Image (cartoon, rainbow, N blue to C red):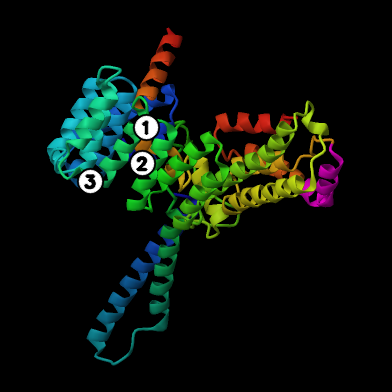
Amino acid sequence: MSKETKDRLLRVHSSGLYNNLSPEQALSLYHENKNFLNIATSNLLLAQDSQKDIYDLTELQFYLALITKNDTEAKMMLGRLTDKFGGYKKSQRIAVLRSVYIEATGSQPKNYQEASKFLESVPQFGKKINVIRRRTYLASKLNNIDANEYIKDLTSYLEVKPSDNESWYELSEVYLKLGNYTKSIYCLEQILLCVPFAYNIYYKLGAVYQSYAYKILYDFSDSNNANKRENFNYNQATIDKFFNFFNLSLKHFLKSVELCESYYKGWSGIFILTKPLKFKNKNLVSKFSEKNEQYSKLNILASQKLKEIIKKNWTSEENKKLIEKVLTSE
Amino acid sequence: MSIVSRIAYLIGTVLIAHSGYSSYEFNQFIKSSSSTLELPLDIKLEAIAGLILFVIGSLIAVISPHQYTLLENDPIYTAIPQNDSALFKPIKMNKATVELEKLGAGPFEQIENKAAFIDILKKRREFDEWVMSKE
């Protein structure tokens, strides 16, 4: 048990990484955190030294136990937190944890309803931001509620708390699923107003712009019933629009790697975007070749950087395999 | 602790001790002869040189603690660029974020992970499937 391990576990908690773990990783982290908490809580001196850290890790353990189906332990962790901070009437964070527990362990079809009923029973429900947020999510999972309803709920929540970046991100993903690119972009830009250096958001913006650009081409050929999109005669307005978003996408990818030199996603985006176009349409190709020199330079730079990231061990083994795939893709 | 820092510690300690003994002897001499001489410059210089060596030794001895990547357990040491001290973090943001990315989570990762919107049932289903596939 060392300070390094504690820092590492705390970083997993603060970065919300437990929401993005593979089952295998979740299980190994679960065991590690369990051992750490066992030692730390039995060692009174240490427990007094960093009370806040211990309770953060207890919350992490609650989530990990639920993910790995150790429900009794999750209940125990919830009990510890409740003992310390008071019940759900006092603390909205506890209320949210309890609703997650009800959601996870309740009988299958009704659990969303039960959890959301519980959240509504929290006193002064309308004033508790975190409780409202979780309820918004639960409402989206209930039957007969479509995406539009969810969007309405999320926007009304964001009107109360416009600085909640996670919710903006969620809203942008909902819009993206519906194919509403402009609104999705707007949501991501709202995040950048709060955290102007968030390079992963710049990357995401670039990716959304990229799909938007290709969707314009697709829509045009689709509406004219073309069999081969590559050979289709796009009109000038479509081509201009395409390159507008194409360049915006490139700009945002470049911004992301400007802020983080080893951000492999950003470099991969640049690498794929600046590859020679596959389309055989003359107007499109001629417009592309106007800046051909710049694009090919960027393409070479991106592939160099990706190779450098692999060589210098700047990312995990899993991501390295992804980079290899990008580099060898046609 | 590197060998350089050990040598610096040793020489520094000897110098300080020696200058201390010299000034004691000098004091004894002043008491017995009742003259008004000042402490000689070489004793002062020796003490200062010893202190400087001691400080340098302790600065070299500091090694930045190693950190662990978030998901795989292998320790990776904080990047030490050439001709640069391990104690200082890079100033430019594009260099400073490299280390965090290497450890597994950038500074703005929590926005992307959206832990507040965790889909716990889906996670549990995935876990079930993984356990089944292993058996």
| Chain letter behind tag 2 | A
In the image, A193: left or right of A317? left
Q: Is residue A219 above or below residue A49?
A: above
Prevailing secondary structure of the magenta residues: helix
Q: Which residue is mark 2?
A: A153
Q: Residue at 56% across / 43% down in the picture?
A: A204
Circle 1: residue type: Ser
Q: Which residues are magenta?
A: A281-298
Q: Which residue is mark 3?
A: A126
Q: Position of residue B68 (x, y in %)?
A: 44, 38
Q: Which residue is mark 1?
A: A140
Asked if residue A282 is among those painted magenta in the image, a careful observer would answer: yes
Proximity of marks 2 and 1: CB atoms separated by less than 8 Å: yes
Proximity of marks 3 and 2: CB atoms separated by less than 8 Å: no
Circle 2: residue type: Asp
SS type, badge 3 = helix
Circle 3: residue type: Gly
Between B77 and A145, the one nearer to me in the picture: A145
SS type, badge 1 = helix
Say if residue A193 shows up in the picture. yes
| Chain letter behind tag 1 | A
Q: Position of residue A258 (x, y in %)?
A: 61, 54
